[in-house]
Structure formats: C-alpha cells, structure tokens
Image (cartoon, coloured by chain):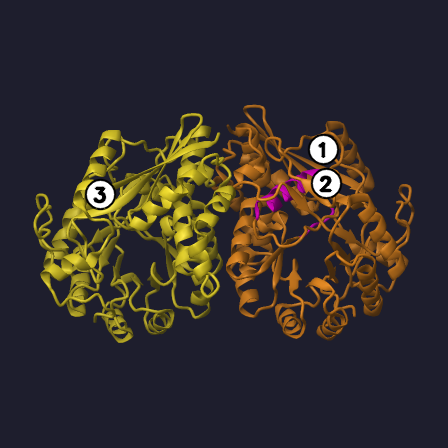
Chain colours: A yellow, B orange
Amino acid sequence: MRVTELRVTPVAFRDPPLLSCGGLHQPFALRTVIELVTDEGLIGLGETYGSSRMRECLAAIAPVVVGLDPFDLHDLLFRLRPCLAPDLERTNILAPSSLGHKFLARVYGALEVACLDLQGKMLDLPVSALLGGAVRQSVPYSAYLFYKFGAHEDQPYEPDAWGEVLTPDALVAEARTMIADHGFRSIKLKGGVLEPELEIETVRLLRREFPDHPLRIDPNLGWTVATSIRVSQALDGLLEYLEDPAGGLEASAEVARQVSMPIATNMLVTTFADLPPAIRCEAVGVVLADHHYWGGLRASLNLAAVCATWNLGLSMHSNSHLGISLAAMTHLASVVPNLDYACDTHYPWQCEDVIEGGRFAFADGALAVPTGPGLGVELDRDALERLHLQFLDCRIRDRDDRVGMRRRQPTWSPELPRF
Amino acid sequence: MRVTELRVTPVAFRDPPLLSCGGLHQPFALRTVIELVTDEGLIGLGETYGSSRMRECLAAIAPVVVGLDPFDLHDLLFRLRPCLAPDLERTNILAPSSLGHKFLARVYGALEVACLDLQGKMLDLPVSALLGGAVRQSVPYSAYLFYKFGAHEDQPYEPDAWGEVLTPDALVAEARTMIADHGFRSIKLKGGVLEPELEIETVRLLRREFPDHPLRIDPNLGWTVATSIRVSQALDGLLEYLEDPAGGLEASAEVARQVSMPIATNMLVTTFADLPPAIRCEAVGVVLADHHYWGGLRASLNLAAVCATWNLGLSMHSNSHLGISLAAMTHLASVVPNLDYACDTHYPWQCEDVIEGGRFAFADGALAVPTGPGLGVELDRDALERLHLQFLDCRIRDRDDRVGMRRRQPTWSPELPRF
C-alpha cells in the first residue's frame, strides 16, 4: 500500500467568545483536515492546526509523501525533514526545542495519525490495538470551563446559548449546565482572566457545588510567582493540580517548592528537549500530552514512558478541535496506563463537525473508544465542504486572540504575567 | 485471534569455554523457546533466558495467557502481574528496580516478542514494520572477542576450533579469524579476565591490526575506579566506549568524570527505574539495550526515546542466544534511528540453532533484516527436539559461570572488583 495523494482541506467552525489571558477566541476556529489517499483506495484521516504556516507546509510536502508506505513512519520523518530543513538549520543548534523542531513534530504528528488510520483500516484494527491495546474502554474527559462574553462583536451568527460568564456565580451555572449535558466528573477552569480573588471564589463555589469533582485551574502563565503561591495557598486541598501558573521553568520550580498541589504544564514542556531541564529543576509534576505537538501518537507513548520513569503525572491538553482529533485523542488516552487525569477537550464548546454520523456524544463525561477500523471515523463530505466554505468566507487565516480583546478594550495587552 | 496454548521448550546448546570476570561459560548454554499457539493455527515465537525460575514462571503462567488477544499487549501485562504478585509485593516499595519488577519485564518481554511475531504473521508484515519501519536494511554487529580456554574439562564434546586464547597475541588471532569469517567492522573485547596491562596490550594490538575498527572493552564491573581510570588513560583515543568498568553509579560517575571516552553500561542501568539516578549523577553516556530484560521490543523503543531525549548513546547487549533472539534483536535494531553502535552478539560462538533453514549468516558483519512475516523465522522441529534432549541430558539447570572456574582454580572467587 502506497500513498498516492495528500489532500489538505482548511476548515473553520463556530467558536464561542471564550476568554483566557491570551485574549478572546475568534468567532471561527481554524483546523486543517488531512486525507492520505492510497493506491488501494483507502483514505487515512488526520486533523491538525489551522495556521497559515501549517497549510503552506502541508501544501509544500504534498508531493513528498506520494509513494510513502503508511507503515514506514521513519520514512515519513525522513521525507519531511528536508522540507523543513531551513527551519531546522536556522534553529536547531542553539535550541533543540526551537520552533523548527516543534513545527516538524507538528507536521509529522498530523501525518502519523493519518498513517495509523490507514494502517488500522488496512488491517481492520482500531488504532488503539495498533498502539498496544486499550487499557480502558472509555476515556474520561473534564468539563472545560471558561469565562466568556455573551456574543462576538458584529455577531457573525446567532449568539451561543451559554450567555455571558464573567462572575463566579455565572461560571458555576455554566458548570452545572455542562455537567448536566455531558456528565463530566472532573472540572478544569480556564483562569488568568478575572482578578485572582474572583477566580479563587469561583473554585470555592465549584467545590461547594461539586464536592466530589476533581478541580484544576489553568491561568496560562498569567500569574507572578507571588500570585501563584497566594492563590495556591487559598485553594490548598481543593485542586488536583495547578496548571501553568507562572512563566519559566525557574518560576515554576519556585512555585512547586512552595505549594501543596502538583504543578502541571502544557506550556513549559512541549518537546522532548524540554524534559531534561524541567525534570532537573523539578519545575513540574504533571505533563499534559497533546499528540498534535508532541509528534503524534507513538511519540506521545514515549512521553508517557518518560513520565512513568520519572514519576511525573500525565494528563492531556486540548485546543479547539473537531471529531477527528477527538477520536485520535481518545485512542491515545485509551492505551496509556499512566494517564492519571481526565483529559481536556474543547469539544463541548463546538457545534459543528466534519465526521459522518454527527458529533461524538459523551456518556458520564467519558467517550467510548471507537471500535471501527483505524480512528473509527469517516468524513462527512458535505460537512467538510460546508466548513471549508466557512473557512473561505470567514477571512480569518491565523488564530489571533488579541484581535477581539482589543476591539473591546483598545488598551488591552497580552503581556504576562497579568496578575 | 486468541491464544490457545503456550508451549515452553527448554533447550541447551554447545557453548565454548569463554571467560569473563564472572567466571567460565559452561559446556552448554540454556535458553527457553516460547510458542504462542492461536485458534487460527498461527504460532508466535519467542526466545528467552534458560533459568529454572523462567521455566517455572512460564509453566505457571501458561493457563493465564490462554484467551489473550496478541494485539492486546496491555492485557498481557495485566494477566502476568498477578502471577508475579508475590515477587512484586515483596520488593516494589523499597526499590522499583528490584528483582520482582525486573523479572516481570523479562517474562513480559519474552511473550511480547511472541505476540509481535503473531501480529506480523497475521498481518503478513515483518516485525520491523509493526515497530514503525526499518531505518536500515541490515544491522551491523560487532566481533565479540573473548579470552577462552581450549576446551571444557571432561570434554563433553569435541573442543571448538578456536583453541586456547589467553594472551594478547592469541586474542588478535581470534579477532582475525572472526572478522575473516563474518566481516565484522567493530570489535568488542570481553575484559576483566587478564591483568589490566595485558588487556591494554590486547587493545593496542587490535588497534594496530584493525586500524579502522571501532573498539570497546567490557570488564563487567571487574575494575576499581583507579584501575578503570588507569586503563582508560592508557587507551585514550582508542575506544569508542568503555563498558561497565567499575561497580555502582557513583563509581561509574567518578570514572566518567576522569576519562575521555563515554562510559557504557548494561549492568548499572537495566530497568527504567535505574535511568533517573544514572542520568542525575551522569554515571553513563551509553546505555546497552536488551529487549530480553528491558521488557520487550516496544519498551526498548521507549528506552531509545529516553536516550535520544537525554543525549545518551545507545548500543545493544547480548547473552548467548539462538536465532529467534537474533531475529528479534535485528528487527529492533533496524527501527531505532539512534542506535549509535554496532550491536553485540554471541551468535558466532554458537554452532547450533532451532530455526528452519540453518543458522543466520553475517555479511560484512551485518545481518539483513528478515523480511518474512513476523520475526521472519520458523522452528526446525527436529532441531528443537535435539536441543531439548540436549537440555535433558546436560543436567545444567541454571547458568553458573563459577562452577567451571572452581574446578580449575579451587580458590577462584567471583568477588568484584578483581583488579
């Protein structure tokens, strides 16, 4: 079996006005849908970032993957490397975790998932079986709570039903709805948005309302070390982990020394090269995996092995995404014995998808591992076309969370730390 | 596809009187041949240690693996764990690298290889494809040189053609023959046997005779720190690495600080739990993988990822073994991009095997990666029966390199360091 074509389809889907300390989600989130077509007529699916750089890169490498054996993942890497050579050469000597290498991992990871989908379809095996077999038949996800505005400026479409969420009480109401709808048994709060005291109050209210739900908060490096310690002390005993409180490994290590809960990260440790220094200075206790930037599903298993070896916890990060990514995340999460926490997902915030049969549904906050061949999902061509047209129409070409914030608050700055 | 039977066949094969600081190889080396039989009539092969404990354990777990899906390697681990619970419970709290865990990795690894063989046979794919695709079509091995006696006491069979090798000149003659026979392009010398000055002389003669062959020496922790440093200084610039010179991580770190070549190990780092402390104290620069004790082929890939992440070199260890192990080693070595050195193998010292079609042949010191389904080897039932009868007859039930030495030198002690 050989690859005969790489099809790349940029898509855009509605995204609510969610807040983080990076700014405001734009009205449309962008992703790229990947199809690896083979001479046997099978199609392997992948989903990755919707950046212009990713689209350009995938267009440039399309000829390079023609002829690839989808089982030969090393060959995939060898084929990609020369295409990214300028990036790699510019950056790899001084910093192996540099942008060039990060981008290679992203491109490779996107195509690796499509190759694994092809392998599974050819062998009539789910991706979980290719990865060693599921250790859990359903994967728990967390309720991912955001402070948010009621509607996007200009209202390119009807406002979502969630309404404005800018107070602790409104956030708890959001949690109530999301948990009623999907049954989540863990809660993640996107922090770094309101004054820390209000976010402390939010967590306390969440704890009162959901006494048995593990809680976590993620201010995206928006706090100083002092704020991180102050918030942590106020929330002592309430959090399963504190995610990315303060910027830099040294700062994170300082926070880790002073607080009781583990420090988690998906921002300070994003490549294998980041692991040795982070482990050396004990900056983090939990790593959030994300196959989209760790280099695919098998590389994520290597990360899991590192975490098991160094007694680091393991959780899973998410960006706004569609069902192909959710299927891949679920297969990965199903096979990692030491995935210690419910996974993050933005999926409940979306209302559109490109997969056949409609959107995935959570049961008791968990997703059954797809049992069909490969990822277990197929494209709905009409939906793909619709979201592609939406991409063409929406005129957003790169995610920029600063734009919407500045329209509302012209003096708003993304500078960190915020508090 | 489900496993219906685990067949375990102990075998013994002729082994020359090779010397190490652990003593003398016995006249017969022991291994255990594993067959996982499935309901579809496929048979997955594995080869592992020939210890009585391994035989007992495999006999005890035979009922447990009936019903196993050979793709579900996590299920394999879950099935094995309770069988080894007494070992694990006794040891895991105080030392995660303890014997119980080490033994579990050995048993699991033996069966994992047989499962991968089954997967490959079912899917008509070589194991290398299941592991991500070969990055090299042939795997270089090193000439593994030993000082040796001319014959075993009692001569249970005709002495080998190598004769006695107890001087630097004789060792160089051995190297000449082995390299003429197999074309090896790297040389490993088993050290810790003669006085260090004689081993230094041996390496210098080897360098003179083979100016372009990378050289390494392995005294199996037989030297003090002072001896290790003295030998290293004498051999400065001649060795690609120095393997296991002195016992203990601290001693190894001390040697590493004082010498120019990297320190390699297959004795100080043998489990994942050994990696963090070894890395922390910079005790070793090269890890020798061995899927037989690292927990199989996929776990060895995790080890390779750790080595890549921490900039450790990677090489491969061997015990006396037959063709099934050699096939598995070759598939593994073929898919690891960062396997930085020629692999070790005792194979040229053996003259018997259990595989169909006769023994593997090296070309230019390398072995072509088998391309047939699975491991690419099948059992020669007559040969298996012959080596099994040899096992029954030879009365050796556990490897004990001290026995032969004590018959020749009654005061001989295996105590380390020797020099």
Q: Is residue A241 above or below residue A109?
A: below
Percent position of residue B76, x then y: 51, 40
The chain letter under disc 2 is: B
The chain letter under disc 1 is: B
Percent position of residue B378, x then y: 67, 30
Residue for badge 2: B322
Camera-nearest label, 1 or 3:
3
**Residue type, mark 2 in image:** Leu
Looking at this view, name the residue that lies furthest to the top: B40
Tell me the quarter of the picture where residue A60 sits.
top left
Residue in the picture at 46% in, 69% down: A280
**Residue type, mark 3 in image:** Ala
Q: Is residue B8 above or below residue B86?
A: above
Q: Are marks 3 and 2 in contact (CB under 8 Å)?
A: no
Residue for badge 3: A12
Q: Crowdedness of circle 1 by 10 Å Cα count: few (<14), some, many (20+)?
A: some
Residue for badge 1: B355
SS at circle 2: loop
Which of the two residues, B61 or B201, is positioned nearer the viewer here? B201
